[in-house]
Image (cartoon, helix red, strand yellow):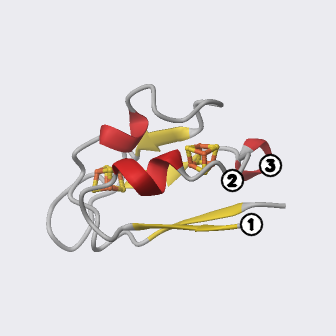
């Protein structure tokens, strides 16, 4: 099963990975958490739906997403 790891303290909360990039729409900016830089970090809502496509990894301007297949 694919796995996506968000490096929360590297995330800048830009939301690019959450804006229609994910084909199964499982990435959101965590509304209730702030990382060490003061941003709402991206989080995966349901890892079991991840296809491992890597689109989130490709769109992220930071090295904040790792995708394992
Ligand atoms: S690897 Fe693909 S399916 Fe999985 S979270 Fe990223 S964009 Fe979504
Ligand atoms: S694209 Fe990268 S930096 Fe932007 S919210 Fe997603 S994980 Fe964070």
Disc 1 residue lies near ligand 1 with CB under 8 A: no
Of labels 3 and 2, the one closer to you: 2
Q: Residue 69 shows which numbered tag?
A: 1
* Relative to 66, residue 26 above or below: above
Q: Which residue is mark 2?
A: 52
> Could you tell me which secondary element the residue under label 2 belongs to?
loop
The image shows residue 20 at horizontal and vertical percentages of: 45, 25
For marks 1 and 3, give the CA distance: 12 Å
Q: In this view, which residue lies farthest toward the top?
A: 20
Labels 2 & 1 near each other (Cβ < 8 A):
yes
Q: Residue at the spot x=75%, y=60% of the render? A: 2
Disc 2 residue lies near ligand 1 with CB under 8 A: yes
Which badge, 1 or 3, comes first in the chain's sequence?
3
Disc 3 residue lies near ligand 1 with CB under 8 A: no
The image shows residue 58 at horizontal and vertical percentages of: 41, 53
Mark yes or no: residue 31 visible: no
**Res 14 quadrant in image:** top left
For marks 2 and 1, give the CA distance: 6 Å
Q: Residue at the spot x=41%, y=36% of the render? A: 18
**Res 37 quadrant in image:** bottom left
The quadrant of the rendering that contains the C terminus is: bottom right
Q: Residues within 10 Å of mark 2 (few under 14, many from 20)?
A: some
* Relative to 10, residue 2 above or below: above
Q: Residues within 10 Å of mark 3 (few under 14, many from 20)?
A: few
Q: Residue 48 shows which numbered tag?
A: 3
For marks 3 and 2, give the CA distance: 10 Å
The quadrant of the rendering that contains the N terminus is: bottom right
């Amino acid at each position: 099963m694919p796995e996506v790891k968000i490096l929360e303290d590297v995330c800048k909360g830009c939301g690019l990975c959450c804006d229609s990039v994910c084909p199964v729409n499982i990435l959101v900016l965590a509304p209730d958490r702030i990382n060490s830089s003061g941003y709402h970090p991206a989080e995966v809502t349901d890892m079991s739906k991840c296809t491992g496509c890597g689109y989130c990894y490709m769109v992220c301007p930071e090295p904040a997403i790792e995708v394992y297949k």
